[in-house]
Amino acid sequence: MAITRASQARDVSSILIARSNLIMKHKISLYYFLGIAILIFSSCAIFIPGYSDYVSAKRFYAMRHYDSAVFSVSSSLRIKQDNPKGIALLEIAYPLAVHYHQARIENLETIEEKSKWPKLVREYEAIQKLGTEVQLLKPILQSGANYTLTLNVKDYTYALKEAKPLAADYHYSLGMKLREEATKQDQKSAAINFKSALQFVPGYLNAQELYDEARANATFTLLISHFRGDRNISEYLRGQMMIQQSGTSKEFLRIITREQLNTILNEQGLVQAGITENNYMEIGKLSGADHILSATIVTTHRPVEIIKNQISQEREVTVRKESYVDSAGVNRTRNIKGKVKAKVKHFKKSTGATLNLSYQIMDVNSGEMVFYGTVKKRENFLHEWATFKGDDRALSDYYKRLVKQQEVFAPSKSDLYMKMARVVPRQFHNKIYQHYSD
């Protein structure tokens, strides 16, 4: 009897373990299919019209950037009107955005200083822009989703009409005070204020005339000296700096071009006097330059290197088919598996170079350095290919692609240098102009 009970206990235990394993397998399968479903839904959601803008709107709303939330969800609803969640988000975000600007307006209206008017204009324009967006969206939702958007939109046209001349007057008055000062920085600030007045009210008084005058007084004239370093690169970069100014004129900076420099040398008889282009301080004073730009270029090159690795590849594939008769007497065919091998030689060819340009800008009159900085560029080359011996069926997809590649020549040192040099001028220009635009 004891043996029978023990046997029954073992049987019950086995059944429970089997049942537990079965439940676990079902759970794993359920989680697996659930994960696949989520993945498929997520990937499909990316292609739902307007989905990306709707997601952006929710993110902006969570960050309390209500204006951005309104414009993003509006963009989404223009594409897909039948989106109740998007409409609900718009109906929440728009009042919050308006309330934010109205609170700022109420706070600004309590201030006595005239400096409040430009800020008020910006707040009025922000609310007006939000309202315009909602008004344009109303008929779209009505026709596309049969939904009547009842958001209250207030018109700030009159408020803007009243505030813009006051904002223009504030900047005009400030510009008039600043233009009395002789420094280039004050003249620059005056020009900026006259320009702001014109932006609020085009043609405001004589702001355009005063802007042109202040801008001329504020403009710095820059003479570019020879760059030190690799001759080909340095001359190329210097030439680009002198050429691009004519096509990319900046508000408060004038670069003396090569033609202008040659004219100065010839007209003033400087060559006969023994003064050459290398006498930059002398030429700078005679040309009316305020600053002189000089630069040093340092290049490095990493020689071509080829790294070779040998990799063994092995895979089980169908090596042949075999015919047989099954238990029912039916002729059938089965695959006979076997391992195939290959030896791969994997090649990596690489080289690279760097270009570091350090510059400084000196004041012609004082000889003091006023600006300095660096521009850095790196260029790398990498090419991979492979050869093999053995059965190509053993190759992974990665090596199947590589064996189709052929060895190519690596770029020369001079090719790498010039490739970087063609990209550097734009970055260099931006850095130089940034000094004079701040």
Image (spheres, grey):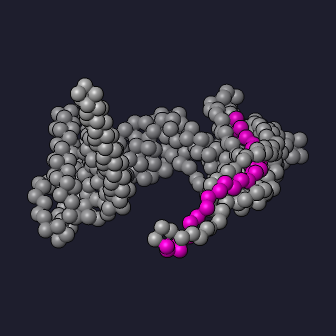
Q: Going 13% across and 64% down the picture, which residue do you hit?
A: 147
> Closer to the camera, 108 or 397?
397
At which x and y percent is residue 405?
A: 73, 60
List x then y, in percent, for residue 432. Answer: 61, 41
Name the residue: 19% across, 61% down: 135
| 249 on left or right of 189 | right
Question: Which residues are the magenta region?
Answer: 329-358
Residue 342 x/y as whole percent: 73, 53
Look at the image and tell me whether residue 366 can be seen.
Answer: no
Q: Residue furthest top?
A: 2
| Image location (x, y in percent) of residue 313 | 69, 50
| Residue 279 on the magenta segment | no
Query: In this rendering, would 44 be left or right of 155?
Result: right
Extreme residue in the front direction:
1
Q: Residue at x 56, y 66 (%)?
A: 334
* In the foreground, 16 or 191: 16
Check the image and report above or below for 289 versus 362: below
Closest to the observer: 97 or 190?
97
- Which residue is found at the position 61% from the left and 61% from the top? 336
Q: Nearer the viewer, residue 191 or 233?
A: 233
Query: Can residue 316 be seen?
Result: yes
330 inside magenta stretch: yes
Q: Is residue 249 above or below residue 326?
A: above
